[in-house]
Amino acid sequence: LAAGLKYRRIVLKISGEALCGEEGGFGIRPETLHRVAAEIAELQRLGVQIGIVVGGGNIFRGLKGASAGMDRSQSDYMGMLATVINSLALQDSLEKASVSTRVMTALEIRQIAEPYIRRRAMRHLEKGSVVIFAAGTGNPYFSTDTAAALRAMEVQAQALFKATKVEGIYDRDPRRHEDAQMFTRLTYDRFLVDKIGVMDSTAVTLCRENRLPIRVFKLTTRGNILRVCRGEDIGTVVEE
Ligand code: UDP
């Protein structure tokens, strides 16, 4: 591990929307993908072991389908497949940046990805491959935030990093309120009591029970992924 880095093993959650480059946008923007991949490549070269969970909201969200009358579980499975598409896109980008990667999926699709097996995932991480965890938890009624918290615990990551579109967690929506204040630190309890929407409460509850710190920061600021791995105090940390 290169000097100055605080974390040896991390799990990074990237929302699907972060890949399409615009708020509420659709699909995958190649430039965004390549930029994210380049930052992850740099981190990997410094010796950080990286697990990534990608969302699917840029393609399909279970709740949206359900609100349009679809069966919720069916709709959620579609959402999970959307995360597989994003995972494959990210894998392609990372490999083009010369990063060895493995996609491990919670739903079996053997022709394109390995099934998720915890011990095997740990082994890939130890050997320096970036592991992309696809298909969320494999269960409907869950989110990729929860999948990220779960995988982070399973592979014994030291922190969960949630890369978002905003700088951190605010006391109200910063896109609607100019005077919104960003927290630099929040306790799990405060996060849960205040029903903060940045991350779902199941994920935060899991992290609380296992004392896994969560750092929320802006993905599109160049160098941020590296900064958080150095332990710099950017964005908002949610901890005890
Ligand atoms: N999903 C699910 N179970 C999981 C993870 C994801 O059912 O364990 C589905 C759910 O429908 C969700 C969709 O996959 O809406 C995409 O994931 P998410 O909304 O978390 O993506 P993001 O908002 O991070 O892009």
Image (cartoon, rainbow, N blue to C red):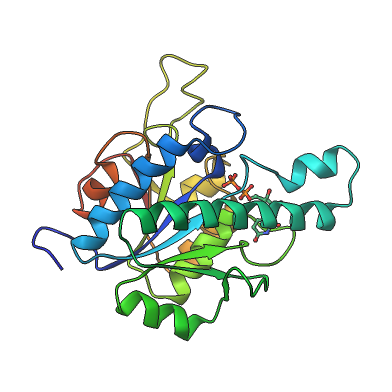
Residue 207 location (% of width, % of height):
47, 63
57 versus 124 height, above or below: above
62 versus 196 height, above or below: below
| Residue at the (83%, 56%) spot, across then down | 74
- Which image quadrant: the C terminus? bottom left
Residue 50 location (% of width, % of height):
35, 64
Of residues 194 and 156, the one drawn nearer to the viewer in this rendering:
156
Please indicate whether residue 215 sits to the left or right of residue 59 in the image: left
Of residues 9 and 131, the one drawn nearer to the viewer in this rendering:
131
| Residue at the (63%, 55%) spot, across then down | 143
| Residue at the (91%, 41%) spot, across then down | 69
Residue 73 location (% of width, % of height):
82, 58
Q: In the rendered image, which quarter is residue 136 located in?
A: bottom right
Evaluate whether residue 36 shows in this view.
Answer: yes
- Which image quadrant: the N terminus? bottom left
| Residue at the (50%, 62%) spot, across then down | 149
